[in-house]
């Protein structure tokens, strides 16, 4: 049975599979059960959607046979297979397109070869066509530039950092081999062995993912917004591996400061998923106090914000109590870093997101707003945990910080944080954010700019920015959202699903900065999913008012939409809403909430 969720993302290419626990282990391992670790992910094979390119008709024959779903089993015969032929200077190469970005590896099945010896292939995974044709850089290094680090990649920007995506592989004949663990959509195979014929039976992708339903949904009168909502949901789904990652090609790590858009999207799409708990638990073990998460003080602020938001959605008091000492200890640590005049010395770098980094004054302002936001949430968490003195300590930190409110220096990231933290009126922040439309937006902090616009009632304007900015990636062939994007890049560029036309720039290879220049740029980054959570929260209008969604507000904001409907997960079941604009401009709502959820309109 197909899960409608994964089918939506993969166009019905992926059959649903039950998540199988390792309950039954072979008897020969009796007594060694503690050595086993359950694989919480599932896997399935995906046949290529198209043969994008072949080197020549003589070197690659019957390539379309690779698009036929097959058995995964090698055969002793050679009929009905793609043939790769290296003869003289004519070399066999093929690029396959799997239709969507995926996380996982590749299975290659070979029948007969002539002469009978193991063939060698070069395999290149790519998030874009051009990445599969890039040359690997082997001289990467980090270069310090002020408070930031950038990659010095000399001439080439394609790397094997974090995941192997360019390698030589010796393959068996009359057999199969599975390789790779990365994020990709395209694969290029080059037969390297001279004077050889290979009967290639199959090249299938191996999708590794959490087999979980999309409890939340979103549908409205603007299909572009529907596509953006689902793309954001799918981007996060791919990054929900054993833990929540930043990216599936690069940054396959737990970065606490980058996770808040992901946990927000998980709240509205997947519900109370174990990956959030395991990621926060592991992060606390990795960075015990007085360390900051990932060595960055701002990331410890995001931890507090995530804890409060997650508790409001799911009300898991046991998990909150488990982290209670850490939460209160973090308040103690911050208390020692803010003096009586409101000066702070948190250290650990002042980082918001990469695009904001050149604006040091703006980053400083936004950074302090982030501390205020986090300490306000910390006070609420401490009260929930029954520690009033610690709550008052957090509030006293806020009072000291508010003695020195810094100007945003025209940084939209800072404007969004200042509005959320109550340091600036939403009206003034929205005015600054809307200056130039999507100009100055980023895939990460764009979420907080959108939140500030919502605070000022600028819903139509926010939806327009979502359509232009996040939709701009879809226009270039994206099937997941990117680590960074700038609308200034789109003039005279090629799409990611084509060879770059003559005279145009490469949207992947020619752009990117800091730690993500060119092909190192991740095209599936969970922090870019903000519009998914934002549209569920503000267009559908569903927002928790009491922990565990015991009471929720349903106040739709359609902007210029004619209608919107969808679902939102709660611990008691899914809320369903449908909002339709009437002839007089009013909105008629249909709301179905599970037992135990009180709805406030």
Image (cartoon, rainbow, N blue to C red):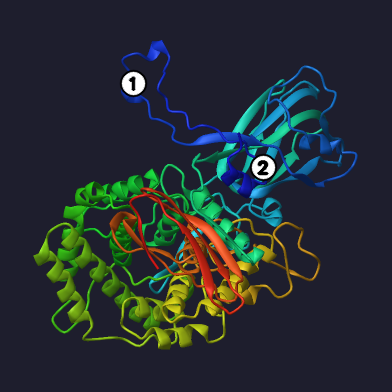
Which mark is first along the chain, 2 or 1? 2
| Picture quadrant where residue 194 is located | top right
Is 337 rendered above or below residue 290? below
As drawn, 188 above or below 537: above
Q: Which of the 4 quarters of the picture holds residue 370?
A: bottom left
Residue at image mark 2 = 12
- Say which element carries label 2: loop
Q: CA distance from mark 1 to mark 2?
A: 37 Å
* Residue 421: percent from left, percent from top: 31, 76
145 on left or right of 488? left
Pick the residue in front: 510 or 23. Answer: 23
Q: Is residue 128 above or below residue 492?
A: above
Instruction: State the residue at coordinates (21%, 61%).
Output: 381
* Residue appearing at x 18%, y 80% in the figure: 399
Q: How many marks?
A: 2
User: Quick one: label 2, few (<14), some, or many (20+) residues within 10 Å?
Assistant: some
Q: Which residue is mark 1?
A: 33
Residue 428 shown left or right of residue 382 in the figure: right
Q: Position of residue 555 (x, y in %)?
A: 44, 69
The structure residue drawn at horizontal position 41% and vertical position 81%, both measured from the top left corner, is: 415
Q: Quadrant of residue 522?
A: bottom right
Of helix, strand and loop, which one carries label 1? helix
Q: Residue furthest top?
A: 28
Q: Residue at x 26, y 70 (%)?
A: 347
């Amino acid at each position: 049975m197909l899960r409608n969720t994964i089918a939506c993302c993969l166009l019905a290419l992926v059959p649903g599979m039950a998540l199988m626990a390792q309950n039954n282990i072979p008897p020969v391992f009796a007594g060694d059960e503690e050595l086993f670790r359950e694989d919480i992910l599932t896997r399935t094979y995906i046949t290529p959607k198209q043969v994008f390119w072949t080197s020549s008709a003589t070197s690659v024959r019957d390539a379309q046979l690779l698009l036929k779903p097959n058995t995964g089993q090698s055969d002793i015969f050679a009929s009905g297979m793609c043939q790769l032929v290296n003869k003289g200077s004519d070399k066999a190469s093929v690029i396959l397109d799997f239709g969507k970005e995926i996380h996982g590896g590749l299975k290659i099945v070979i029948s007969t070869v002539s002469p009978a010896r193991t063939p060698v292939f070069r395999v290149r995974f790519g998030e874009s066509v051009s990445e599969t044709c890039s040359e690997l850089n082997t001289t990467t290094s980090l270069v310090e530039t002020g408070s930031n680090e950038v990659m010095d990649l000399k001439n080439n920007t394609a790397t094997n950092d974090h995941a192997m995506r360019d390698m030589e592989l010796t393959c068996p004949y009359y057999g199969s081999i599975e390789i790779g663990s990365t994020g990709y959509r395209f694969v290029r195979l080059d037969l390297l062995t001279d004077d050889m014929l290979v009967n290639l039976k199959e090249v299938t992708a191996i999708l590794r993912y959490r087999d979980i339903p999309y409890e939340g949904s979103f549908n409205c009168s603007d299909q572009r917004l529907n596509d953006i909502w689902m793309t954001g949901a799918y981007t996060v789904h791919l990054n929900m591996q054993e833990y929540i990652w930043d990216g599936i090609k690069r940054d396959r790590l737990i970065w606490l400061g980058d996770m808040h858009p992901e946990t927000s999207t998980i709240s509205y799409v997947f519900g109370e998923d174990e990956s959030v708990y395991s990621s926060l638990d592991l992060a606390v073990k990795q960075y015990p106090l007085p360390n900051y998460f990932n060595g960055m003080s701002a990331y410890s602020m995001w931890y507090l914000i995530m804890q409060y938001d997650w508790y409001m959605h799911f009300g898991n008091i046991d998990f909150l109590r488990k982290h209670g000492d850490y939460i209160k200890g973090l308040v103690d640590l911050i208390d020692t870093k803010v003096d009586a005049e409101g000066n702070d010395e948190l250290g650990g770098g002042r980082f918001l997101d990469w695009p904001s980094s050149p604006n040091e004054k703006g980053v400083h302002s936004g950074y302090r707003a982030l501390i205020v936001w986090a300490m306000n949430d910390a006070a609420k968490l401490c009260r929930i945990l029954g520690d009033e003195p610690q709550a008052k300590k957090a509030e006293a930190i806020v009072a000291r910080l508010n003695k020195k409110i810094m100007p945003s220096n025209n940084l939209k990231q800072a404007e969004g944080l200042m509005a959320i933290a109550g340091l600036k009126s939403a009206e003034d922040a929205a005015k600054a954010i809307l200056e130039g439309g999507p100009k100055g937006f980023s895939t990460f902090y764009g979420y907080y700019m959108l939140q500030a616009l919502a605070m000022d009632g600028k819903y139509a304007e926010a939806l327009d920015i979502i359509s232009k900015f996040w939709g701009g990636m879809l226009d270039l062939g994206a099937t997941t959202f990117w680590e960074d994007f700038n609308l200034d890049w789109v003039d005279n560029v090629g799409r990611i699903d084509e060879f770059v036309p003559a005279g145009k720039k490469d949207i992947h290879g020619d752009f990117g900065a800091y730690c993500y220049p060119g092909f190192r740029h991740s095209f599936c980054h969970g922090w870019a999913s903000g519009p998914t959570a934002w549209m569920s929260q503000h267009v559908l209008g569903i927002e928790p008012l009491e922990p565990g969604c015991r009471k929720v507000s349903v106040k739709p904001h359609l902007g210029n939409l004619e209608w919107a409907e969808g679902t939102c997960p709660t611990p008691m079941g899914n809320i369903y809403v449908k909002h339709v604009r009437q002839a007089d401009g009013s909105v008629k709502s249909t709301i179905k909430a599970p037992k135990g959820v009180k709805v406030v309109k």
